[in-house]
Amino acid sequence: MAIGEPLGPMVPLYLGADVFSSTDIRTENHPRYHAKFAKKGLATKIHFSSAFRFHGLKVPIANNSLWFYSIQGLFRVAFEMYSKQEQLAVLENFQDVWKSQINDSPLKMMYNLSVQLDSAISNSVTEMYDKDLKVKLMSHLQHCQIAREPVGVRGIDTGPPGDTSADHDYCSLPKDSLQTEPIQLMLSTMRQQLHSLEERLYAESQGCTDQLETILLLLQNTDRYMNGKLEERDVTETVLALLEAKNWGSVYSSQLLNSIGRWLGQQFHAANSSISQKVEGFKVQHIERITDLPPAEELATELFPEAMQTLLLQWMGLSDESTLEKRHSEYPILLLILEFANHNLITGVAHVLYSSLICK
């Protein structure tokens, strides 16, 4: 849209809703910000007579007004509230307009329009500024954005007052705003985090190799997760990379180890019923030779999950090849721990010890 004295120079204006579409400001708070910029002559509230109609916009009859920004106001908002990438987009697309309007006077806080431009002037205004008004002030991730797309004002006419089929309401919240607002906020936060990461990567061109490899791994697996292609090995690589990223402190006070221990315990406890079924099946098969069971390592491997054995082997320091002999001699202890922890007694030693402990 453009305003100006009759036969005088035109001043391009930009719809306030479009200007703020790339910010995190809640819609209901827009008027307060518009008023702040209006006091500086960068924005204005235009009141229209009931004769005015807009293509693609709907304005309540009770308050037939809209907020607009000058090119200087657009740049001020961009450099105060936009990301650096969005600021660059504004510079590239609007610098010529800004140069041509460098000497514009500040806007009044309010204008009242009650006279319609004649067709020739209206068409020339639309032709002059249509290209600028159609540029979207969105980031590179705008395809992920759930918020509505900005709508450019193409002109003003006096179309039939009942024709509202193509109207877009910029003056009231959409019905589903309460449902979509948390999602919009999360998407906005994600975009800011990605922009911040990109800026840091540009600034730290000589970053630590291990750190960069971990960041790359996280980004790759985030992409796989979003595409529904994340697999167990991907999660394994990611978790291990984060666990090994630094020294996480004392085992007595580590929140990380405490959380991992809790999670592992819950997983192992959930597997108890399937382990019990395996143990019972094993007992039925070996009922005739219960005193002549296979070696402890074979029993543990056959009846208990590998993850349980791995945890205990690492914990007991029996995972290295150099401790192979010690491992064979101490595996009966490991098997006893598995029997007691899973409440599934197999060996005669386990039965005797359990009875002895219970009696005491």
Image (tube, rainbow, N blue to C red):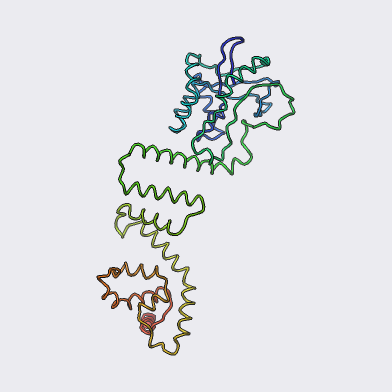
Residue 209, given in percent of the width and then of the height, sits at: 31, 47
Quadrant of the image for the N terminus? top right
Residue found 47% across the figure and 76% down from its top: 276
Quadrant of the image for the C terminus? bottom left
Q: Is residue 219 above or below residue 158?
A: below
Q: Quadrant of residue 288?
A: bottom left
| Residue 261 visible within the image | yes
Residue 343, given in percent of the width and then of the height, sits at: 43, 76
Q: Is residue 298 left or right of residue 322?
A: right
Q: Nearer the viewer, residue 107 or 332?
A: 332
Q: Is residue 263 above or below residue 219?
A: below
Residue 241, given in percent of the width and then of the height, sits at: 36, 54
Q: Is residue 336 left or right of residue 57?
A: left
Residue 173, given in percent of the width and then of the height, sits at: 61, 36
Q: Farthest residue to the top: give it.
A: 7
Counting labels gives 0
Q: Is residue 190 left or right of residue 46?
A: left
Q: Is residue 24 above or below residue 114?
A: below
Q: Is residue 164 left or right of residue 253?
A: right
Q: Farthest residue to the bottom: give it.
A: 288
Q: Is residue 265 above or below residue 68?
A: below
| Residue 360 visible within the image | no
Residue found 46% across the figure and 57% down from its top: 231
Q: Quadrant of residue 296?
A: bottom left
Q: Nearer the viewer, residue 297 or 256?
A: 297
